[in-house]
Image (cartoon, rainbow, N blue to C red):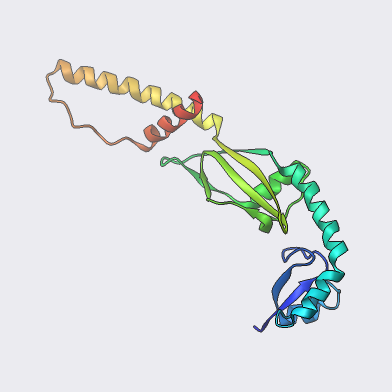
Amino acid sequence: RYCMKVILVDRVLHLGNVGEVVNVSNGYFRNYLAPRKLAVYADQKNQQQLDMHKKRLGKKVDEHKQAALGVKQQIDGLRLEFVKKVGANGKLFGTVTSIDLARELETKGVSVERRLIIIPNPIKSVGTFDVKVKLFQDVEAKFQVHVVMDAAQAEELKAKSKAASKKSKKTDTAETASDIPAQPERELTDDEKLSIEANKILRS
């Protein structure tokens, strides 16, 4: 599809903020943006036209920037906590996504588009992660995401670990009494791997 550069004269959900230059299809501009006066044609080859539009939008850009700064104050320093089930490899069953974060921020009274949320590294394990939100040009907020193992799962795994430990001790005692040669060290089961992870979390 043919793409063109336009400058947004108002904030467009999932596309950009007022004053931003974005690429859109010809049809999208002609059928949606232009009739609603949400954007104007601004080919960067015509720099004079682009500068003129930006100057006209100066006041509106400033208003939107001030609003973004207000949202930044709400987000900066927030700590969102997620309780997740964990697999034998220490990884989560699923990833904490920008959709999850946007929904959780909504519960805190902060409405943010998921496209504005920047997750530097995929959140696939327990731990604490730094996340950014690009609210406007030169306006960026930061918050933390803390992921913990489900407490019920952790307790269940701890109980299984204790039971497995007792069974192992009984087996070792029986083998010693009957002079059976020691068996080579076996590979940990999935439950045992998970219990190790659970014990780490319960001790933290």
Placement of 53 over or under 102, stated as above or below: below
Image quadrant in which you'd find residue 165? top left
Q: Is residue 168 above or below residue 150?
A: above
Give the number of callouts.
0
Residue 81 visible to the viewer? yes
Q: Is residue 23 left or right of residue 56?
A: left
Kindly tell me whether residue 41 is visible in this rendering: no
Residue 119, percent from left and from top: 59, 51
In the image, is 3 to the left or to the right of 190?
Answer: right
Q: In the figure, residue 181 lies in which quadrant?
A: top left
Where is residue 49 drawn, in percent x and y? 80, 80
Q: Position of residue 38 (x, y in %)?
A: 83, 71
Q: Residue 183: x, y in percent?
A: 18, 29
Closer to the camera in the image, 132 or 177: 132
Q: Quadrant of the N terminus?
A: bottom right
Nearer-the-camera pick, 113 or 5: 5
Residue found 82% across the figure and 62% down from its top: 61
Residue at (70, 76) in percent of width and height:
24
Report the front residue among 52 and 109.
52
Which residue is at 73% across, 71% downward?
A: 21
